[in-house]
Amino acid sequence: MVHKITLIPGDGIGPEVSNAARRCVDATGVKIDWEIAEAGADIIKKYGTPLPDSTLDSIRKNKIALKGPLTTPIGTGFRSVNVAIRKELDLYACLRPTRSYKGVRSRYENIDLVIVRENTEDLYAGIEFEEGKPETKSLISEIEKLGKKKIKSDSGISIKPISISGSKRIVKFAFEYAVKHGRKKVTAISKANIMKFTDGLFFKAAQEVAKEYAGKIEYEERLIDNMCMQLVQKPELYDVLCLPNLYGDILSDLCAGLIGGLGIAPGANLGEGIAVFEAIHGSAPKYTGQNKVNPVAMILSAVLMLDYLGEKEAAKKLDNAVAKVIAAGKSVTYDLKPNRDDPTAASTSQMADAIISAL
Ligand code: NAD
């Protein structure tokens, strides 16, 4: 069977790591018809937008994409294309397994955590009001009237919507993942003691869903600040972590740090029958075009993709090949060497070659 998959190379280091992942997937022998689609800052001149309809249509049609990172300018410029793709396609679940690989220098061993992050709501909803704008002023006065609270007139405002339906579906996803993958516990995380009507609602929704799994999967709750400390001190106590969007984003990087860095942390964005696979890391612009960065995060995202496609054997084979190359420590990129200036560090493409040889 041939799988038709949209491939978005991305920008910055995106094309380099995407190409490495594509070569590794092709080398497993799984037949893939890649449909290349563009997105990002580089194509605005050509299409007048960083996210052309043709790219979204390609993902909608193929129902599956492998995506390289895309740059989002900070503070100004266009909104995140990554966030727009997730919202447009209602990819409500962001799945980020974080597992230790032997041979990666890290302060921790045997980490095996799965982050399930809500992907469409929260402060990421993109509902923002710029300081000084007339609509911001009228919003401030409306909130002051309704909420009987004073807001400084020179404030910018970001809105944090969290719904019962959105919370229930992400918690359900986390429990279903736990059941299917032999996990024992789901921990829901938020800041419910302070934001009672959003984070508190998230916990309430989670408790209702958890009842359906009572006796099968354990359920517990943590506050996000305490969770950060707990993960640094005793990560072995945790299993599947389920969070609203912003906390999930932050904790993903923390967990990537536990296993030795962003270079080996994969991810997937999943909706109903539709999925976009991408690394947690961004476009690392300072390394663009240097054939230097670690392709593993992108290759492991492709492993998740193969698993999703039902190509379990190929997924396992590629995962094992990655583990073998990392454990051997020879053909690995600079970030996996004891000394980051090691002149024997492999390039992005050389590491991909070594993984292909280890298949
Ligand atoms: P980043 O992940 O791009 O890079 C931070 C640092 O992590 C890099 O400087 C590098 O030292 C290291 N790193 C990242 N990927 C690596 C790899 N594959 N191998 C080795 N080291 C690696 O984060 P940033 O600098 O905050 O963001 C850069 C741009 O990427 C921003 O525009 C941001 O918005 C965007 N971004 C995109 C996505 C996405 O496409 N999903 C995700 C995160 C950030």
Image (spheres, rainbow, N blue to C red):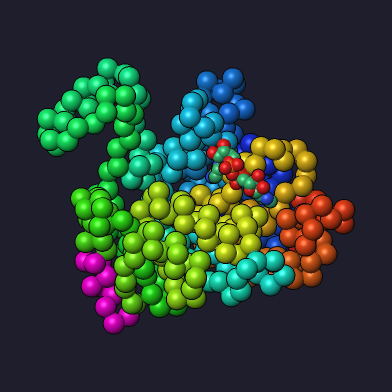
Judged from this view, the residue extending furthest toward the right is 343
Front residue of 90/117: it is: 117
181, above or below 245, in the image: below
276, above or below 217, in the image: above
Front residue of 23/248: it is: 248
Instruction: Please give the name of the residue rendered at 37% of the width and 35% of the height, measured from the top-left corner.
Output: 126
Task: Tell me if residue 13 can be seen.
Answer: yes
Q: Where is the N terminus found, in terms of image quarters?
A: bottom right
Percent of width and height locating residue 260: 63, 62
Judged from this view, the residue extending furthest toward the top is 134
Front residue of 70/77: it is: 77
Front residue of 199/319: it is: 199
Indicate yes or no whether the magenta region holds residue 297: no
Percent of width and height locating residue 38: 59, 34
Instruction: Please give the name of the residue rendered at 35% of the width and 53% of the height, measured from the top-left corner.
Output: 244
Instruction: Please give the name of the residue rendered at 16% of the width and 28% of the height, measured from the top-left corner.
Output: 142
Q: Where is the C terminus found, in terms of image quarters?
A: bottom right
Q: Which quadrant would residue 219 be assigned to in this image?
A: bottom left
Judged from this view, the residue extending furthest toward the bottom is 215
201, above or below 184, in the image: above
Percent of width and height locating residue 300: 62, 60
Percent of width and height locating residue 22: 68, 51
268, above or below 158, in the image: below
Magenta part of the protein: which range? 207-216
Q: Which quadrant would residue 327 be assigned to in this image?
A: bottom right
Instruction: Please give the name of the residue rendered at 32% of the width and 19% of the height, measured from the top-left corner.
Output: 132
Q: Is residue 97 left or right of residue 325?
A: left
Image quadrant, ligand 1 = top right
Q: Is residue 144 left or right of residue 118?
A: left
